[in-house]
């Protein structure tokens, strides 16, 4: 009997951290869905749906934190999803972003970040290890509004378009020098096993339950752009 209790306790101690870790990823995906919905629904100020439709991938970092330890810094975690067909999106790859103070001057200590990856260059490198925005991929502050017609040449040539929202203020920003990378431990927490990021964005991994709302929203906004 004592041996049975010992085994049960061991299972409990192992399981609790696993559930807690997965819970963090579930929360991030739920927050990402809310961020996307709120930003896309800002009248005349949201991300242009035609740009979303043209993008290869989207990266959403809810509530990125700012900190200072002798110098400014930013850190956040979120999810990247990539387009499979016109209106269908992959399951999420959990990612992180880190960087120094890069001119995020719209206030607040917690900022939502949305990045549109406009072509496939740099995506493979990101999925293998990490890349630096502005180094491995050119980036620009994204245009706002219902249509991308007002976008500048620099914006349209950029490989990534960057947006931020803090305290209700939504704006295109520059995040040059920030480092993006996949978080393999976070992905393992979410999927319950080791999964390769390339397999996820190729559509070889089913969309997990906690990500279905986010994927459904991306499909909805992609379809809106096609009309």
Image: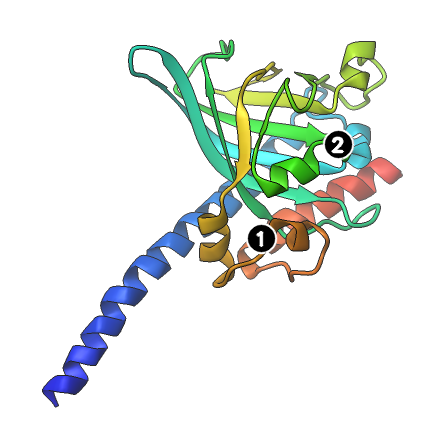
Using the rendered image of the protein, determine whether residue 152 is visible from the camera's viewpoint. Answer: no
Of 33 and 82, nearer the camera is: 82
Helix, strand or loop status at disc 1: helix
Q: Is residue 31 left or right of residue 206?
A: left
Rendering coords of residue 197 (x, y %): 61, 50
Using the rendered image of the protein, determine whether residue 59 is visible from the camera's viewpoint. Answer: yes
Q: Write the residue at 65% across / 62% down.
A: 206
Rendering coords of residue 202 (x, y %): 72, 53
Q: Which badge, 1 or 2, comes first in the chain's sequence? A: 2
Q: Is residue 54 left or right of residue 14?
A: right
Local crowd size for mark 1, using a 10 Å CA cut-off: few (<14), some (14–19), many (≥20): many
> Looking at the rendering, which quadrant does residue 223 occupy?
top right
Rendering coords of residue 22 (x, y %): 42, 55
78 relative to 73, above or below: below
Q: Write the residue at 69% across / 51% down.
A: 90
- Count of numbered tags: 2
Badge number at residue 211: 1
Q: Write the residue at 35% across / 60% down.
A: 18
Local crowd size for mark 2, using a 10 Å CA cut-off: few (<14), some (14–19), many (≥20): some
Rendering coords of residue 215 (x, y %): 66, 49
Q: Which residue is mark 2?
A: 121
Helix, strand or loop status at disc 2: loop
């Amino acid at each position: 009997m004592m041996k049975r209790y010992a085994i049960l306790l061991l299972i409990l101690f192992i399981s609790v951290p696993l559930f807690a870790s997965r819970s963090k990823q579930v929360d991030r995906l739920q927050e990402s869905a809310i961020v996307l919905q709120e930003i896309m629904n800002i009248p005349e100020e949201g991300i242009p749906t035609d740009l979303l439709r043209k993008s290869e991938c989207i990266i959403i970092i809810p509530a990125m934190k700012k900190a200072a330890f002798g110098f400014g810094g930013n850190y956040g975690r979120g999810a990247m999803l990539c387009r499979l067909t016109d209106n269908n999106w992959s399951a999420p790859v959990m990612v992180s972003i880190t960087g120094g103070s890069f001119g995020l001057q719209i206030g607040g200590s917690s900022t939502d970040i949305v990045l549109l990856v406009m072509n496939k260059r740099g995506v493979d490198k990101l999925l293998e290890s990490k890349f630096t925005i502005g180094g491995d991929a050119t980036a620009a502050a994204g245009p706002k509004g219902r249509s991308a017609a007002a976008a500048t040449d620099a914006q349209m040539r950029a490989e990534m378009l960057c947006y931020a929202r803090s305290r209700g203020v939504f704006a295109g920003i520059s995040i040059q020098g920030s480092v993006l990378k996949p978080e393999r431990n976070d992905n393992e927490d979410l999927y319950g096993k080791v999964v390769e990021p390339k397999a996820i964005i190729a559509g070889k991994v089913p969309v997990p339950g906690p990500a279905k709302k986010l994927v459904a929203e991306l499909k909805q906004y992609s379809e809106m752009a096609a009309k």
